[in-house]
Amino acid sequence: MNFVKKALCTGATVVTATVVSVAPAQAAPDKAPAGGVGIAHYACGTTISDKDSSSWVKSAYGANERSGSSTTCAKNGVADAGERLDYHCYTTGNDGITWTYLRNDTDGTAGWVRDDLLSDLGSNVACG
């Protein structure tokens, strides 16, 4: 599968059945599977198997690991700088921001983290 490499921007438009504009204050990396941009929000309590075979990285900024791809979902833990993070895949949340599901091998927690809180912008492998 081919995937588009994400890049930081100051504003983005996510196109699905409707157009959703993201305000500059909430700008996020633009990454989507080749062939289209879509929103595939994962509800609170969703776990994902490991689809990303990249090596572990140390790239969080003290980011909350959530039980779904939304800030309204419960916090499972915190991914801190220097911890071993194993990325599983990414999705675009219902907020128009991309999120990576990861396992924190340092403390054993797992959850969804907004990609703009990961220094390398998270996984490049789509969940769906």
Image: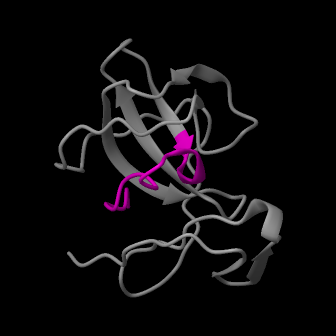
Q: How does the figure colour the protein chain or chains?
A: one colour
List x then y, in percent, for residue 21: 78, 78
Is 119 situated above or below 39? above
List x then y, in percent, for residue 85: 34, 32
Q: Nearer the viewer, residue 114 or 39?
A: 114
* Quarter assignment of residue 40: bottom right
Residue in the image at 63% along x and 74% along y: 9
* Quarter assignment of residue 104: top left
For this orientation, the residue located farthest to the front is: 82
Q: Quadrant of the C terminus?
A: bottom left
Residue in the image at 38% along x and 75% along y: 33
List x then y, in percent, for residue 43: 60, 42
For this orientation, the residue located farthest to the top is: 107
In-image side of 34 versus 41 (left or right): left
**Secondary structure of the magenta portion, mostly?**
loop
Q: Nearer the viewer, residue 77 or 79?
A: 79
Residue in the image at 55% along x and 22% along y: 78
Instruction: Give the residues drawn in magenta, as a range.
Output: 113-128
* Quarter assignment of residue 98: bottom right
List x then y, in percent, for residue 113: 54, 40
**Does residue 120 belong to the magenta stretch?**
yes
Is 101 situated above or below 97? above
User: Total of numbered circles in the picture?
Assistant: 0
Is 7 situated above or below 62? below
Residue in the image at 46% along x and 85% along y: 36
**Does residue 65 belong to the magenta stretch?**
no
In-image side of 63 versus 86 (left or right): right
Q: Quadrant of the N terminus?
A: bottom left
Is 90 situated above or below 71? below
